[in-house]
Image (cartoon, rainbow, N blue to C red):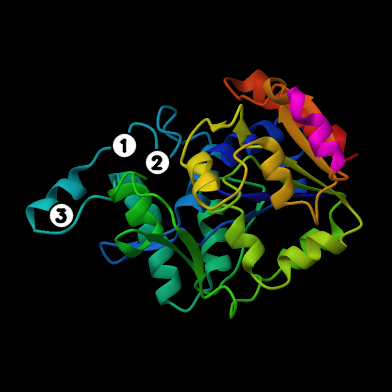
Amino acid sequence: MIAVLAGGVGAAKFLRGLISVIDPSSITVIGNTADDEEFLGLHVSPDLDTVVYTLADAVDPEAGWGIANDTYTALEQAAQLGQETWFKLGDKDLATHLLRTKLLRSGNTLSQATQAVADAFGVTCRLLPMSDDRVRTIVTTDDGDISFQEYFVRRRQEDEVKALKFEGAEQAQPAPGVLDAIKRASGVIIAPSNPLVSIGPILAVPGIREALVDTDAKVAAVSPIIGGRALKGPAAGMLESLGHESSAAGVAKLYEDMLDVLVLDEEDRVLAPDVEALGITPIVTNTIMRDAARRRALAEATLESIS
């Protein structure tokens, strides 16, 4: 069994490649839920949903999130009724959030609701939230503390990030199955995701980072930073503003205590000695997942590195 820590579009694309290489039922995905938020009274889990939609081949291929060919009639009507509609929710997407919210209000845990959503889309990977408890990413800016979605969507990532807090993380417990999945895995992969706000919240839940340090399995990460920049999202700017090196080597340092292998792009081959100096094996390959063939090749190279 392969355990994968995942958050966001890059992770979902990587998982799409992974299921083309190995049996999806042999994969356990541990997803970030610190981006979760309530919109229009509904519980939205953006990272979990992006993984589900992508694995189900239902995702909007241009955006990398949401459902393909969705419409926005309900959101338009909500705006007419004076509701805030800055977070884009399509009509089909809303159905997912309606199901999740109904299940949660009926007493189901987030793990149970997540499984129900995955089953409804025919996803056969095991998909676990990092925790059933509420954890939320709070971004400190010059204007004070704001929610992650406020920073990421409403304010278009334009604020300089002064600090990050994972509200509720210290009191949270790993969701059922998370620690066991890491312990029993034949290999663990940290997918190409923002190390600070996609993977960082997962590692902030007590017991998860320790499990990754202690596991007998090899742990590999795929760097989301290529040539000092992120292909999508604010990772590079965040790393710099928070005092980290915006490079594949900088990512390696953030994961240094748990990592056996770092997969970095050909463009960053020159950084391989820096990674190796940390006691981490560098694997240099093409990490830009432009199409199905490249997604598959990256998955194969990563799997080989932990076999």
**Residue shown at the point (86%, 40%) measured from the top left:** 277
Q: Are marks 2 and 1 in contact (CB under 8 Å)?
A: yes
Q: Residue tagged by mark 1? A: 70
- From where the camera sits, is residue 43 visible? no
Q: Are marks 3 and 2 in contact (CB under 8 Å)?
A: no
Q: Position of residue 15 (x, y in %)?
A: 65, 38
Q: Amino acid at mark 3?
A: Ala
Q: Residue tagged by mark 3? A: 78
Q: Position of residue 219 (x, y in %)?
A: 82, 48
Q: Which mark is residue 66?
A: 2
- Name the N-terminal-most of marks 3 and 2: 2
* 115, above or below 50, in the image: below
Kindly report the distance in space between the C-alpha atoms of the residues bearing marks 3 and 2.
Answer: 18 Å
Q: Quadrant of the C terminus?
A: top right
**What span is in magenta?**
269-277
Kindly report the distance in space between the C-alpha atoms of the residues bearing marks 3 and 1.
Answer: 16 Å
The crowd level at tag 1 (other Cα within 10 Å; few <14, some 14-19, many 20+) is some
Disc 3 element? helix
The crowd level at tag 3 (other Cα within 10 Å; few <14, some 14-19, many 20+) is some
**Residue shown at the point (49%, 49%) measured from the top left:** 241
Q: Quarter-wise, where is residue 183 in the image?
A: bottom right
- Name the N-terminal-most of marks 3 and 1: 1
Front one among 196 and 206:
196
Whether residue 271 is in magenta: the answer is yes
